[in-house]
Image (cartoon, helix red, strand yellow):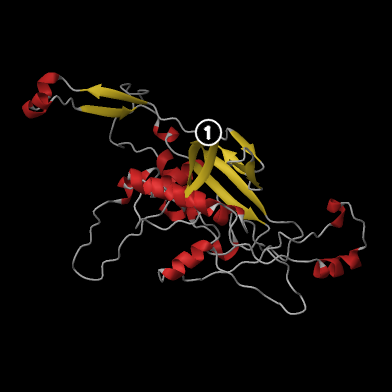
Amino acid sequence: MEFFNKKEEVISLKLTNFGRHLLSKGKFKPAFYSFHDDNVLYNSERAGVLETQNDSEARIQTTPTMHPQVAISSLEKEFNNNYNKILSGETTATSEDVQRTAEKHYMLSQPIGTSDINSEYSPSWTVQFLNGTLSGSSESLSMAEKSGGANTQLIPQLNSELKVETSEILEDVEDLNLEEAEDGFLQSNVSIVTNDDDLYFLLKVAENNGLFQKKNFDVEFFEIQEEVQGNTTIETLRPLLYSKRPEATTGVSFVDDITPDEDVTHVEYYFDVLVDDEINDEILCKFDPVNENMGVFADPRTKLCQDIINKNKRQVFDIYEDESDSPGEIC
């Protein structure tokens, strides 16, 4: 670790250990960049220093700045963990490359965002549970570490639970296949008894005071893995992958040996994730029948939902069928 020499140095570019690993395999393909200001103290009162507003710029520019730090976790520990996983068969040496949790999520975790220049308010989130309930929330995300403390990030957390009740239905012995009976197998079927509306969450997420574009969100899934070391439970984040459907360029069909819903590293193994137009119209109209217009990105579901509601309310009857047995008043 060393300080920048601001008289001679302007910028310093360094690859992380994971970046050098990808570069050695020819997989390093940088495509995005971001700006960060974690090391800048804008409000000097937070440090107990009083200064005028005009003095803040000079202080920020003359404050010593550290060179980039490429690692904040133990390389020896990471090597031993991966080595033990390979020996136990949990992973292979040629498995998918994944960056360590500490470097990916705790270092440079809060890039500078953008806001609407026409709004005086900071960007904010609006999350509505159209189906499902909110069980709790917190202002930050805390992950237990080896020292007994926790890595805390200012990422708001919304907690919710979904319970699926099942009942096991055993078939009669008379219905069993003879070979299966000789092998000692008993076929069983699991029936889900939970109501269909209680089997999924439906969230309406919007960002306020930001730039509304065609693509506004990135949805990521992580599994919290717990590892017990002595009396301490260490928590790490394992990112889950989305499956990429192969595009058929020839008449030959392409079939993977392992489908995404059978691979524990994919999101589809745990959840069925649908967004925007992928969600059934009747479900959207049932829980969110009125949709606000958003300029040129106005959602045409307003008229569609009204048609669905009118269709459900419409009563179909036979005009030739007698409404009652009474002949009515005799003239």
Rendered location of residue 103, percent (x, y): 56, 56
Quick one: quadrant of the N terminus? bottom right
Residue situated furthest bottom in the rendering: 8
Q: Is residue 298 left or right of residue 46?
A: left
Does any portion of residue 289 appear in the rendered image? no
Q: Nearer the viewer, residue 23 or 294?
A: 23
| 101 over 2 or under it: above or below | above
Residue type beneath disc 1: Gly
Say if 147 sits above or below 176 in the image.
below
Percent across and percent down for residue 145 are 58, 42
Residue found at the far top of this picture: 173
Q: Is residue 325 left or right of residue 45?
A: left
Answer whether residue 179 is visible to the viewer in this image: yes
Residue beneath label 1, please? Answer: 230
Q: Position of residue 55 (x, y in %)?
A: 90, 67
Occupied quadrant, residue 169: top left
Dot 1 surroundings within 10 Å: few (below 14), some, or many (20 or more)?
Answer: few
Disc 1 element: loop
